[in-house]
Amino acid sequence: MMRLLLLVAMLCGSAFAAPKKTVTVAADGSGDFKDVQSAVDSAPAGQIVIRIKPGVYKQLLKIGAPGVELRGLGAKPEDVVLTFGNSHAMAGGTTASASTTISGDDFYAENITFDNSFSHDQPHATGDTQAVALLTLGDRQVFRHVRMIGAQDTLYANSKTCHGASEITANQPCRAARQYFSDCYIEGHVDFIFGDAKAVFDHCEIHAIPHQITTLTAQSRVYPNEDSGYLFLDCTVTGDAAATNILLGRPWRAYSTVYFVNTDFKAKLNPEGWAEWDGKLKTSTYAEFGSKGNSGDATKRIAGTHVLTAAEAEKLTLKGWLAGADGWVPEKIP
């Protein structure tokens, strides 16, 4: 009987969990807070919904607590801009350059722009110009209808678990942080989507801006038993008119893993498709399927990359990529 009562109490507790605290941020003082970081700091345990009124919010933003939600109240993502202007050289490293850093699990964002203004503020800067607009480190993070604006290293889709391990073995595989990007816009040039998260980019627009070479991705799976990689599903690749040498990616680490499935290339892709980086293509997994538009001749792709069969592509699904042991289904999040 005691066990039954305990089970009932647990079920009731989960069914009637306390709703998240909700606050409003407004730069003009009409909300609960005038800046986003103050709203985040008001809930050190997380579990908060932060509604953000239209405006430009210039500050370094760090979110480490779980269950934080950022919801832009504008008509479009451009109406709510979270920005700062750091670079690798200015901040002492690429990671430190991030305008916004989100390490808390179960994060959600919608209808917001994450921006690093460095490349616009100092267009003629040289040397260590990596400037991260958004650094994501937590598990079960969701970004819907969000814009990420930068140049080199715009989106650092990363994990806080794998690369600190001294050894990854068959008995101790590393499970990277899972992140879902839906209907997002990501802009940049060199390696502008990079890191070791296990991420899905679903119906996103990937936009290249001019540079001598433009590499959309630089995934960083280090160990053969590291469960990370990027999966692009039904995305569109666009570019400025002067962005002429566009490549899908290059392997930052030895086991980099990236798939592009059913990509529509509005911008012209370099026929080689991918780039080498210190001989790491031979152990990396770089593949595509169903590329269309200005994707070029797939038979001319650089050696070490692949075109998937239809049967292989069918296995690459949102659920299969992100479910994990807990059966996470990000599309069910309201």
Image: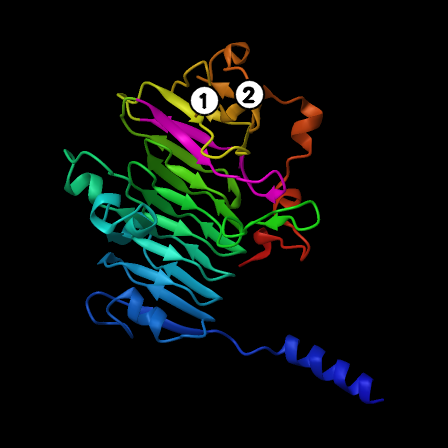
Residue 11, horizontal then vertical, whole percent: 71, 77
**Amino acid bearing label 1:** Glu
The image quadrant that residue 120 belongs to is top left
Work out whether 224 lies above or below 70.
above
Give me the residue at 15% from left, 40% from top.
122
Mark 2 packing: few (<14 Cα in 10 Å), some, or many (20+)?
Answer: some
Whether residue 300 can be seen here: yes
Q: Secondary structure at mark 2?
A: loop
Give me the residue at 37% from left, 22% from top.
246
Residue 312, horizontal then vertical, whole percent: 68, 27
| Magenta stretch secondary structure, dominant | strand
Q: Which residue is mark 2?
A: 305
Asked if residue 228 is among those painted magenta in the image, a careful observer would answer yes
Among all residues in the image, which is located at the extreme bottom? Answer: 2
- Quadrant where the N terminus sits is bottom right
**Amino acid bearing label 2:** Thr
Among all residues in the image, which is located at the extreme front? Answer: 166
Work out whether 35 lies above or below 80.
below
User: Pointers 1 and 2 in contact (CB under 8 A)?
Assistant: no
Among all residues in the image, which is located at the extreme right? Answer: 1
Judge left or right: residue 324 versus residue 162. right
Work out whether 312 lies above or below 20.
above
Tag nearer the camera, 1 or 2: 1
Residue 8, horizontal then vertical, whole percent: 75, 82
Judge left or right: residue 26 versus residue 158. left
Q: Secondary structure at mark 1?
A: loop
Q: Which residue is mark 1?
A: 276
Residue 29, horizontal then vertical, whole percent: 21, 71
| Residue range of the region highlighted in magenta in the rendering | 213-239
